[in-house]
Image (cartoon, rainbow, N blue to C red):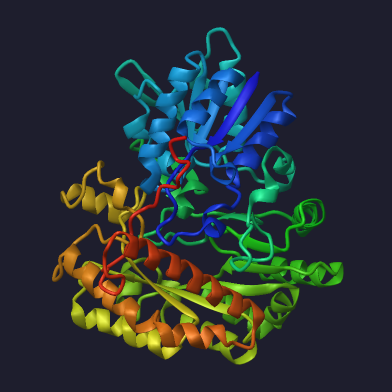
């Protein structure tokens, strides 16, 4: 069968840069590898790096005449573009079966399963489910009820099959089919994630279930309770170090990748993996620089064990820690109890004192239910106290699949039509004391206290090369954005925010 996997055209992420937006979507090579291992003819199209717009994509689909087409989406923000894609497929290749996947469709299967242009939705981890769906669609009379982990429409009803069991041995999956993608076009930024950035993951899932986060749900363990409800439990799994080194060497030697962006929800959960991988990387002689999302409590643990120093020697140069809030009570309310007691502050201090070569990025969530101007000021004070390279303030966003989303829907604060602004830059919820316009204004004022000429100059003259490169990138994209605003005859110093997605010139070509 002919299998087509597509990452369709889309606007750039709000802070505009091809270096940030043009990175490998891990699902594409992973699913392509599984389908190819079964003997199918597989094509993967990532429209962003090759600048393929909607008209060109239509012609490609029509010419390939696929039997099965897959498209996934993790971000609610891009929902309309994913739906536009499925509608296009049914026009360009009417006989093709369409499969949606990813976090957003997993958590919103009830909403999309009845669409005539979506034949099935993969819920959760996709490789085995996608393989079985292809097998089912190969039959003259497909029986989708035998495929676990999917939702589909049957008349006016949504049918949800039994939960898909998680893959126990991630090493059993074939190596990602990077050869089907234009690897030379990814990570071409001279400064961001440089040199020659690539994405990787060694683990899936998380050990926690923060109430604002939907990332863990895609790889969660799913069970049906006595009342017929699906119950999600966080699960974390990792590939072996041998397997990860095999993937790393493939990207390093065949595709010339040197900068790595690990997309794991929590990279450093297992100290045994952290140490063995770091030792192997040091022994390999590969010269890499990499960014990870790390849990602060695990950073402190690894420092005590003498493992963190090895991670830095192995290439760790950019860390993102979710500080989220200054108040322990709010952290507990967000189900992030493991961050209470100042553990994030401890982790950041370790990097500042012992590993100055590492760029430290910290995120804060604002606009929570009891937010007022005093609590916002506490976040500012915390950010000034920890003094990281880049503090990022994001408005809380009710992503589908989270308790915050369920509450917002139940209380009429949002509707299921509101996803266009779910960019983690634009406030979409009021707090008890501030409306979303007031939160947006305060957010702009908070960012101005940190991202300013003084901050920029400090970074540009850093002794550490990776940090200098990051600040050069910030300076370049900021100048570009200011220029675009100036072209629109607006004062760049009075623009309140830069949230809107930017459609590239080739978007509709």
Quick one: 394 or 495, which is closer to the camera? 495
**Residue lying at 36% horizontally and 56% vertically, measured from the top left:** 423
Answer above or below: position of 459 versus 275: below
Instruction: State whether residue 457 appears in this view.
Output: yes
Farthest top residue? 140
- The one nearer the camera, 351 or 502, is 502
Is 377 located above or below residue 43 in the figure? below
Q: Is residue 55 left or right of residue 423?
A: right
Q: Position of residue 278 (x, y in %)?
A: 75, 71
Q: Is residue 140 left or right of residue 488?
A: right
Q: Position of residue 177 (x, y in %)?
A: 71, 40
Q: Is residue 63 above or below residue 169?
A: above
259 on left or right of 80: right
Q: Residue at x 64, y 88 (%)?
A: 463
Say which quadrant the N terminus sits in: top right
Camera-nearest residue between 166 and 85: 85
x and y percent of residue 4 in the render? 59, 28
Residue 327 visible here: no
Q: Above or below — where is 232 with respect to 463?
A: above
Numbered-mark total? 0
Q: Nearer the viewer, residue 465 or 80?
A: 465
Image location (x, y in percent) of residue 311: 70, 75
């Amino acid at each position: 069968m002919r299998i087509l996997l597509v990452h369709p055209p889309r606007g750039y992420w709000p802070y505009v840069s091809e270096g940030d937006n043009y990175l490998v979507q891990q699902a594409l090579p992973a699913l392509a590898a599984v389908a190819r291992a079964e003997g199918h003819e597989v094509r993967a199209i990532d429209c962003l790096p090759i600048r393929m717009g909607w008209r060109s994509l239509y012609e490609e689909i029509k010419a390939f005449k696929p039997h099965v087409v897959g498209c996934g989406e993790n971000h609610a923000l891009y929902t309309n573009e994913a739906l536009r894609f499925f509608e296009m497929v049914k026009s360009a290749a009417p006989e093709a079966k369409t499969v949606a996947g990813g976090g957003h469709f997993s958590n919103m299967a009830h909403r999309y399963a009845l669409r005539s242009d979506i034949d099935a939705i993969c819920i959760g981890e996709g490789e085995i489910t996608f393989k079985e769906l292809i097998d089912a669609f190969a039959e003259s009379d497909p029986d989708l009820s035998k495929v676990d982990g999917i939702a589909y429409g049957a008349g006016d009803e949504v049918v949800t099959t039994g939960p898909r069991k998680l893959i126990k041995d991630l090493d059993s999956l074939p190596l990602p089919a990077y050869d089907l993608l234009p690897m030379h076009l990814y990570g071409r930024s001279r400064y961001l994630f440089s040199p020659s950035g690539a994405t990787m993951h060694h683990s899936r899932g998380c050990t926690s279930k923060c109430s604002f986060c939907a990332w863990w749900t895609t790889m969660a363990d799913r069970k049906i309770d006595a009342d017929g409800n699906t119950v999600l439990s966080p699960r974390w799994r990792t590939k072996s170090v041998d397997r990860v080194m095999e993937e790393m060497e493939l990207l390093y030697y065949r595709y010339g990748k040197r900068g790595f962006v690990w997309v794991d929800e929590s990279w450093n959960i297992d100290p045994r993996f952290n140490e063995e991988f770091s030792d192997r990387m040091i022994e390999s002689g590969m010269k890499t620089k990499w960014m990870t999302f790390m849990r602060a409590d695990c950073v402190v643990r690894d420092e005590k064990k003498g493992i963190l120093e090895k991670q830095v020697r192995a290439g760790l140069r950019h860390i993102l820690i979710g500080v989220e809030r200054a108040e322990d009570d709010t952290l507990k309310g967000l189900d992030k109890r493991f961050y209470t007691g100042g553990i994030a502050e401890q982790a950041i201090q370790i990097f500042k004192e012992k590993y100055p070569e590492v760029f430290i990025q910290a995120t804060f969530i604002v606009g929570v239910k009891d937010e007022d101007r005093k609590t916002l000021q506490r976040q500012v004070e915390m950010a000034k106290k920890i003094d990281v390279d880049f503090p990022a303030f994001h408005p809380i966003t009710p992503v589908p699949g989270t308790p915050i989303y369920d509450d917002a829907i139940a209380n009429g604060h949002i509707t299921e039509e509101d996803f266009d602004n779910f960019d983690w830059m634009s406030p979409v919820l009021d707090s008890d004391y501030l409306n979303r316009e007031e939160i947006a204004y305060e957010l702009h004022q908070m960012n101005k206290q940190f991202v300013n000429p003084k901050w920029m100059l400090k970074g540009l003259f850093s002794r550490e090369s990776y940090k200098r490169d990051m600040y050069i990138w910030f300076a370049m994209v900021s100048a570009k954005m200011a220029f675009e605003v100036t072209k629109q005859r607006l004062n760049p110093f009075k623009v309140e925010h830069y949230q809107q997605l930017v459609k590239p010139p080739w978007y509709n070509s």
